[in-house]
Image: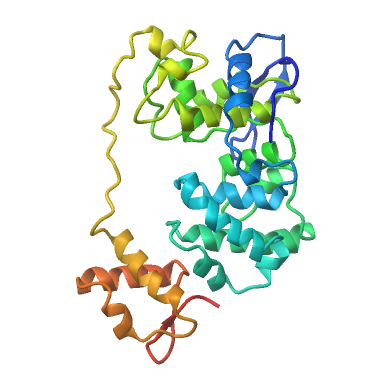
Amino acid sequence: MFRHKGRPAAPYTVSEGEAGGIPHYRQEVPKANPLLDPILTWYAANARDLPWRASGATAWSILVSEIMLQQTPVARVLPVWAEWMERWPTPAALAAEPPGEAVRHWGRLGYPRRALNLHACARAIVDRHGGEVPSDHAALLALPGVGEYTAAAVASFAFKGRHAVLDTNVRRVLARAVSGEEYPPKATTAAERALAASLLPGPEDAPVWAVAVMELGALVCTARTARCAECPISDLCAWRLAGKPAYDGPARKGQSYAGTDRQCRGRLLAVLRQAHGPVPKAALDAVWGDAPQRERALDGLVADGLAEVLEDGTYRLPL
């Protein structure tokens, strides 16, 4: 597991790359990051013992965890991740299976297109990189389904790279502690990327800094409740020192699930996952009463590559 070792080195400033706006970094005059030591000290004492943080975790296991953890709590990911790593311990093992098996074993994690992305990612790793997860940030970013956050996280956590890792938790901590705002903007901005880059410590501490800020946001500086009494940087937090001004941006709407197309798709996909062969249309009709919504959801599954319709009108997971 990542631990705090040593002192911060010089931060880097950010400049936009020529392609894709990916940040590049150049070293400048050292500037102290007062958040660094208290957050790393807190993390050393409070970090959760998660298997993808273990010293023996492979780059593949870390990549799988990062994709599974997108919009999904750790408690739900843990058993599915463990099953995946036992069944598919390498990219080659997953790449050898049909994509439908990835969808089947995704279980109830939600957003099942992530399963297809992981399968496509495994095949790309085998085809382009000899079955080894690449360490280069640009090569990671070129993999199917891997975006800016995931590429930075894998390069940092698996290969000890020095990257600004901006997930929802990190963005919220920096918004409160540095910018004095209760919540960050809905979408990541260039200003946030520049701020995160300016706070990066040197190569030795950068990977643990990334995961430590993330952990602080997940456990203490949460979206629903900021537990300032437990926070190691409460005396430095701009938002707390300003009196915790209320968020005044666009309305933050909670995601509903009951009765939505997402729930309908989940019910239909559960039938397909439980079957080990083609499923008659009647079996799918039986799990959702709203026929127009059911047909729309089923068409969406087929369009997204999560299901296939055969000539006899039956359905199955993709081969």
- Rendered view: 116 above or below 288: above
Q: Residue, x 58% and y 41% (percent of image)?
A: 148
Name the outermost residue toward the bottom.
Answer: 312
Where residue 302 appears, as percent x and y from the top left, is 41, 72
285 horizontally vs 7: left or right: left
Where residue 69 appears, as percent x and y from the top left, is 51, 47
Q: Residue, x 70% and y 23% (percent of image)?
A: 4
Where residue 243 appears, as percent x and y from the top left, is 33, 9
- Residue situated in front as seen by the camera: 157 or 253: 157
Q: How many marks?
A: 0
Where is the N terminus found, in terms of image quarters? Answer: top right
Q: Residue, x 70% and y 61% (percent of image)?
A: 91
Where residue 146 appears, as percent x and y from the top left, is 59, 49
- Rendered view: 193 above or below 315: above
Where is the C terminus found, in terms of image quarters? Answer: bottom right
- The quarter holding residue 50 reads top right
Q: Residue, x 54% and y 63% (percent of image)?
A: 116
- The quarter holding residue 186 reads top left
Report if residue 189 is visible in the image: no
220 horizontally vs 126: left or right: left
120 horizontally vs 181: left or right: right
166 horizontally vs 206: left or right: left
Report if residue 311 is visible in the image: yes
Colouring mode (rainbow / by chain / secondary structure / one colour) = rainbow
